[in-house]
């Protein structure tokens, strides 16, 4: 009877681990979207859009007025200022192109991390959970909670990431 209860407890623990993995993946995906939003302020998006569409403040042809094109009138941009802004079109087109590449790399990296996490979770689930008791699983979880802020387990130590030193971060071409 104790063995059946123990097996049920381990099965429930295993299901909870799987559910946590699903929730963790959804959270990471949502955080990635938020990161992209934070890394791309609205005015960047506007100038990238304007350059790619020859619209708004970077309008080269005088297109129809809509909410994205009306800003020139709202802030009373002069003809001379319009010319100056139009000269920026190439810069913003190149910037938009680079941003697209970086965002795609960011998403690909995030997806690769999720794949690796899934691989590790599957391995642990298949190799270790069948060998454990619920008591061991609880003790392990308690111990993990205890050590979670240990400096030796920080991203800086394990993965050699230094967020304070912009020159220490790997360059992406």
Image (tube, rainbow, N blue to C red):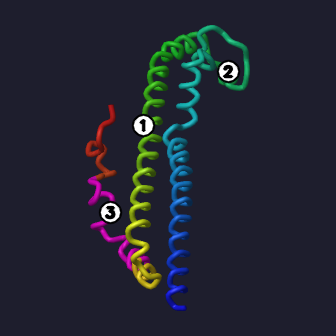
Q: Is residue 152 magenta?
A: yes
Q: What residue is disc 1 on?
A: 105
Magenta residues (range)? 141-160
Q: Residue at x 54, y 56 (%)?
A: 27
| Residue 66 spot, x, y in % from top left | 73, 21
Q: What residue is disc 3 on?
A: 154
Q: Is residue 71 magenta?
A: no
The image shows residue 168, relative to residue 48, as above or below, that is below
Q: Nearer the viewer, residue 151 or 115?
A: 115
The mark nearer the N terminus, 2 or 1, is 2
Q: Nearer the viewer, residue 160 or 62?
A: 160
Q: What residue is disc 2 on?
A: 69
Q: Nearer the viewer, mark 3 or mark 2?
A: 3
For the N terminus, give its image quadrant. Answer: bottom right
Residue 33 quadrant: top right
SS type, badge 1: helix
SS type, badge 3: loop
Q: Nearer the viewer, residue 33 or 3?
A: 3
């Amino acid at each position: 009877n104790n063995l059946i209860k123990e097996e049920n407890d381990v099965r429930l623990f295993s299901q909870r681990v799987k559910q946590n993995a699903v929730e963790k993946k959804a959270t990471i995906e949502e955080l990635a979207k938020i990161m992209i939003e934070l890394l791309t302020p609205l005015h960047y998006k506007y100038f990238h859009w304007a350059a790619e569409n020859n619209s708004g403040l970077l309008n080269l042809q005088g297109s129809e007025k809509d909410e994205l094109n009306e800003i020139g009138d709202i802030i009373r941009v002069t003809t001379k200022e319009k010319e100056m802004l139009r000269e920026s079109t190439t810069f913003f087109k190149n910037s938009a192109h680079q941003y697209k590449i970086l965002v795609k790399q960011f998403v690909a990296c995030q997806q690769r991390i999720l794949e690796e996490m899934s691989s590790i979770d599957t391995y642990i689930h298949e190799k270790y959970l069948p060998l454990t008791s619920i008591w061991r699983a609880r003790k392990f979880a308690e111990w993990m909670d205890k050590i979670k802020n240990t400096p030796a387990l920080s991203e800086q130590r394990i993965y050699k990431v230094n967020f304070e030193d912009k020159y220490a971060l790997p360059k992406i071409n």
